[in-house]
Image (cartoon, helix red, strand yellow):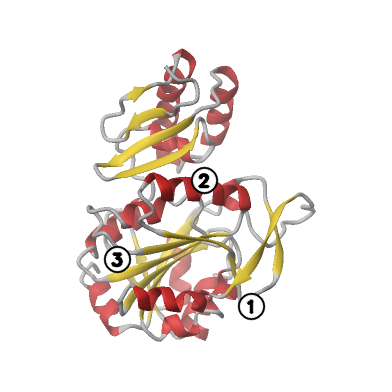
């Protein structure tokens, strides 16, 4: 067994190979931890993964076979992505169920805050309709993982190392200890800088969209507190058939991003649940009824496109 070759994991069956003694049992425990914490939205899972990483160490990468034509790689015992060690676990049920149900729509994905590239990896698969995708990630270290996943999937999606913002060409710092939560906005008393990056506006991908010969887009927006500023740079993209898939955090009682989408941009809002059903949002006050846990982020849809409104309303119950 090559010590530098990755751990191989089959997502559907849970089979683990090329792991070595410690990492094999580590993968099994990571899967168990994911199943145990799933009912409480994985609260505490990072502590489980951290403990396993110390007790059953390995420096290997994990390559998970998600689907027949799709792989996804991440470091062994990653505090966030290791939950995929649990066979068949759906990473983001609301998003994935929705994307499956609109696979017949001829759209291009703009993946802002792509992290390691999970969303771009799945939407470009046959199972999700082989949609073209451009993945944009700000953090330099995370971007290297994004690049690895693009290569692993035969470079079937584009990648950009930038931070989306309201202005282009500015150099900004990256803050945050957790790779899945890094942002260009520092938290209180946060001084550690994880690198810097140049900003772009979302409208800069306009030429890429034209090259795909698409008139419809899904804009996935997960940019850790910069959503409002990012949308200020999406004027041109919003003029086409654009659906925004964004996160409104449970701790934000003002519902800032949803309020901006609805009141400033005039977009219609929907809430997609984990069962694949969409709920039409009639008022900003209704947002609070969905945001029950202040520790979690909640996904919403926003659009002014008649085409997308018709498609989403097919899923309304």
SS for dot 3: strand
Q: Where is residue 201 shown, x and y percent of the image?
A: 56, 75
**Mark 1: few/some/many CA within 10 Å (<14, 14-19, 20+):** some
Q: Can residue 160 be seen here?
A: yes
Q: Say what secondary structure mark 1 lies in.
A: loop
Local packing at callout 2 (Cα closer than 10 Å; few below 14, some 14-19, many 20+) is: some
Residue 145: assigned label: 2
Q: Quadrant of residue 105?
A: bottom left
Looking at the picture, tell me which residue is in the foreground, 192 or 294: 192
- Mark seen at residue 278: 3
**Snapshot quadrant of residue 119:** bottom left
Q: Residue at point 42% right, 17% down?
A: 1
In the rendered image, residue 208, in percent from the top left (x then y), is placed at: 42, 73
Per the model, the C-alpha gap separating discs 3 and 1 is 33 Å
Q: Compute the Cα span from label 1 to label 2.
A: 26 Å
Residue at 35% of width from left, 42% of height from top?
71
Q: Are marks 1 and 2 in contact (CB under 8 Å)?
A: no
Label 3 to label 2: alpha-carbon separation: 32 Å
Taking 188 as reference, is 76 above or below it? Answer: above
**Closer mark to the observer between disc 1 and disc 2:** 2
Using residue 315 as the reference point, say whether residue 223 is left or right of it.
right
Q: Where residue 61 sits in the image (x, y, percent)?
A: 48, 32
Residue 56 vertical placement versus 112 (above, below): above
Residue for badge 1? 167
Depth check, front residue: 202 or 2 = 2
Quadrant in which the C terminus is drawn: bottom left
Q: Secondary structure at mark 2?
A: helix
Q: Earlier in the sequence, mark 3 or mark 2?
A: 2
Q: In terms of sequence position, does the residue under pointer 3 or pointer 1 come before the other? A: 1
């Amino acid at each position: 067994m090559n010590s530098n070759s990755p751990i191989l994991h089959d997502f559907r069956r849970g089979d683990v190979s090329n792991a070595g003694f410690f990492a094999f049992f580590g993968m099994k425990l990571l899967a168990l931890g994911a199943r145990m914490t799933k009912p409480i939205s994985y609260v505490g899972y990072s502590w489980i993964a951290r403990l396993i990483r110390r007790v059953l160490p390995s420096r290997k990468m994990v390559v998970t076979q998600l689907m027949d034509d799709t792989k996804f790689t991440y470091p062994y015992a990653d505090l966030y992505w290791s939950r995929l060690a649990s066979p068949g676990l759906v990473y983001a049920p609301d998003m994935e169920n929705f994307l499956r149900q609109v696979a017949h729509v001829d759209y291009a994905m703009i993946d802002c805050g792509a992290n390691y590239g999970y969303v771009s990896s799945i939407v470009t698969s046959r199972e999700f309709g082989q949609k073209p995708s451009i993945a944009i990630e700000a953090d330099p270290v995370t971007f290297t993982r994004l690049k690895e996943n693009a290569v692993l999937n035969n470079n079937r999606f584009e990648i950009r190392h930038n931070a989306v913002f309201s202005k282009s060409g500015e150099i900004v710092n990256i803050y945050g200890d957790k790779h899945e939560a890094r942002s260009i906005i520092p938290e209180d008393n946060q001084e550690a800088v994880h690198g810097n990056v140049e900003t772009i506006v979302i409208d800069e991908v306009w030429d890429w969209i034209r090259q795909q010969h698409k008139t419809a887009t899904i804009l996935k927006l997960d940019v850790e507190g910069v959503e409002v500023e990012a949308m200020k740079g999406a004027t041109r993209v919003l003029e086409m058939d654009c659906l925004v898939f964004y996160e409104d955090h449970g701790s934000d009682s003002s519902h800032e991003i949803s309020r901006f989408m609805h009141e400033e941009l005039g977009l219609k809002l929907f809430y997609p649940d984990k069962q694949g059903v969409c709920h039409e949002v009639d008022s900003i006050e209704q947002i609070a009824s969905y945001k029950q846990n202040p520790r979690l982020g909640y996904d919403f849809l926003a659009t002014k496109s008649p085409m997308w409104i018709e498609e989403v309303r097919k899923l309304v119950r």
